[in-house]
Each structure stands twice: as C-alpha cells, then as structure tokens.
Amino acid sequence: MAGGGAASPLIEELVLRGFTPTVGIVSVFDTDYETAQVYGLEVVSAPPFEPFPEQAMADFDGLVRQADVIVVAPVFFGRGNLAPLRAVVRLARGGTKVIVVDRPPSPSATRAAARPLRCSRNWTRWAPSRPKDRPKRPIE
C-alpha cells in the first residue's frame, strides 16, 4: 500500500534487492506512481482527492490477493483511502502476512540493523533499530 510518496524509498529498496512489488492505490500525480513507472511495476491508480472508484478497488483486491506479503507504507489514512486498508485487514485475518512500516527510512538507520516487531498474529510492524538510550514507542 502506498501513497503520498511514502512508499517510493521502499519500492526502490525492494526492486534493488530483486523483488517485483506491485503498487496501489495511488494517484497518477503521486511520487509513488512515478517511482513504480520508472521500474516498470504494476500499479493501481485512481484520481486524487476522491473516494477510490470500484474498478480501482477491484484491481487492488486482485493484486493483494496474489501477494506473498503486503507492505503498508507509512501512509496517512482518512475517509477517502480507508477501503484498501480494510481489504488488507481482511486478508491479514485470513492469514496473509502484512508488514506495516511505521516511519520512513532514516539515513541514520542501517538497513541491516532493522528488525520486525510483532503486532499481532499476521501483522508485523517494521522499524529501524533505535539507540538503547532512546525509549521504545508502545506497539498499538
């Protein structure tokens, strides 16, 4: 799941590591859309600033149902973009692995030091390692 440019660094990282992610739902004016186009990835798009059309949701459902893992970028959610999140929640309840990235990659965090944090049975929240003197945020 992408949007607002939040997934572009993740898309690039996955592609550079040999994965072929699919991207959606994003506006054709979104940086995440542009990044997906640069790498020739399959992307589901929709007009900006309005509820997602039924066809975009159907296309998104098709992509996420085929995914081995669903990665949710640090996207802001509101009324207009909750439908894809609900679809992902349903799939997670059915056993699909979901990784939620809770903040964008930081130049000071090394990728090798990143670690998954368990949120529930099928959800993983991904956060870079933090210094020992920095307190951990609670997992919601």
Image (cartoon, grey):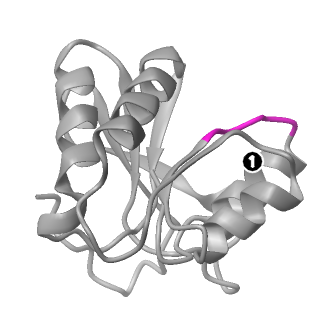
Considering only vertical position in the picture, is 67 above or below 125?
above
- Image position of 4 (left or right of 37): left
Considering only vertical position in the picture, is 107 above or below 128?
below
Q: Position of residue 130 (x, y in %)?
A: 47, 75
Given residues 95 and 77, the one toward you in this image is: 77
Main secondary structure found in the magenta portion: loop
Please say whether residue 5 is one of the residues in the magenta stretch.
no
Q: Secondary structure at mark 1?
A: helix
Total number of numbered discs in the rendering: 1
Q: Position of residue 72 (x, y in %)?
A: 41, 51
Please say whether residue 19 is one of the residues in the magenta stretch.
yes
Circle 1 crowding by C-alpha within 10 Å: few under 14, some 14–19, many from 20: few
Given residues 74 and 105, the one toward you in this image is: 74
Considering only vertical position in the picture, is 40 above or below 96?
below
Disc 1: which residue: 14
Residue at 63% x, 67% y: name it.
Answer: 32
Residue at 44% x, 27% y: name it.
Answer: 64
Considering only vertical position in the picture, is 81 above or below 84?
below
Q: Position of residue 131 (x, y in %)?
A: 48, 81
Residue at 51% x, 67% y: name it.
Answer: 27
Q: Amino acid at mark 1?
A: Leu
Q: Which residues are magenta?
A: 18-22
Given residues 84 and 132, the one toward you in this image is: 84
Q: Position of residue 88 (x, y in %)?
A: 28, 35
Residue at 37% x, 27% y: name it.
Answer: 61
